[in-house]
Image (spheres, rainbow, N blue to C red):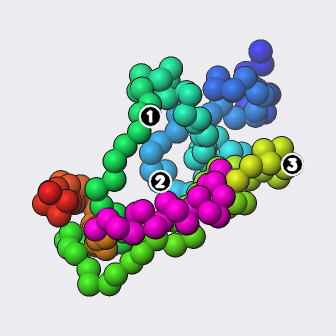
Amino acid sequence: MSTSPTAPRTNPWCGSSTKATPRPARRQPARRPRGEWARWLRERKVQIFPDQFASWFGLNLSTGGEAAALVFPQIHPEAAPASLEERRTLGEGDFMSGATEDRYPDIFGLLQIDGGGSDQARLAVAEQLAELPHHTVALGHDLAANAAFLNRLLR
């Protein structure tokens, strides 16, 4: 291997050839990376399917659950946790369905399913959830304060 600064080197993270030796990624870069470095420091989205939780994280999946209330949070960085006066109900945008489902888009039409169920199924779920208490809340970035507030609110 040549020691010339322009000679290609192998990237230790992916085995591809690059002209520069990559630096370890930092959590907060001092400046926005440009050029070739931008490729290596860019955040990556990982898609994890439910069957991978046990093998990757040692978490067993639940087969059921019981809802006690609906909480609609609004995040304001400096806000103290508080209940808001506005009343919010479930809408179509609260269900993961259709082309905007929270996953990679099915651009080739291979899935041919609507992951959020049929319109009738979503309506039936929304009607049952409408019977539960609804809480619209403001939360800040103080996790301990948010947890204490939600714990008091939902007991």
Choose between 154 and 42: the one closer to the eye: 154
Q: Upstream in the sequence, badge 3 or badge 2?
A: 2
Q: Where is mark 1, residue-wise? A: 63
Residue in the image at 28% along x and 68% along y? 133
User: Can residue 75 be seen by looking at this rendering?
Assistant: no
Question: What is the secondary structure assignment of the residue under circle 2?
Answer: loop
Q: Give percent across and percent down for residue 40.
A: 64, 41
Above or below, 131 relative to 25: below
C-alpha separation, residue under disc 3 versus residue under disc 2: 39 Å
Tag 3–tag 1 contact (CB < 8 Å): no
**Disc 2 residue crowd, few under 14, some 14–19, many 20+, Cα 10 Å:** few
**What's under tag 1, amino acid-wise?**
Thr
User: Can residue 120 be seen by looking at this rendering?
Assistant: yes
Q: Give percent across and percent down for residue 96.
A: 59, 57
**Foreground label between 3 and 2:** 3
Question: What is the secondary structure assignment of the residue under circle 3?
Answer: loop
Q: Give percent across and percent down for residue 128.
A: 42, 62
Q: Which quadrant: the C terminus?
A: bottom left
**Disc 1 residue crowd, few under 14, some 14–19, many 20+, Cα 10 Å:** few
Choose between 4 and 69: the one closer to the eye: 69
- Is residue 50 a member of the stretch shown in magenta? no
The answer to which quarter of the image holds residue 63 is top left
Q: Which residues are magenta?
A: 115-133
Residue in the image at 52% along x and 62% along y? 124
Residue 108 shows which numbered tag?
Answer: 3
Q: Where is mark 2, residue-wise? A: 30
**Disc 3 residue crowd, few under 14, some 14–19, many 20+, Cα 10 Å:** few
**Foreground label between 2 and 1:** 1
**What's under tag 2, amino acid-wise?**
Ala
Relative to residue 2, is residue 54 drawn left or right?
left
- Is residue 122 a member of the stretch shown in magenta? yes
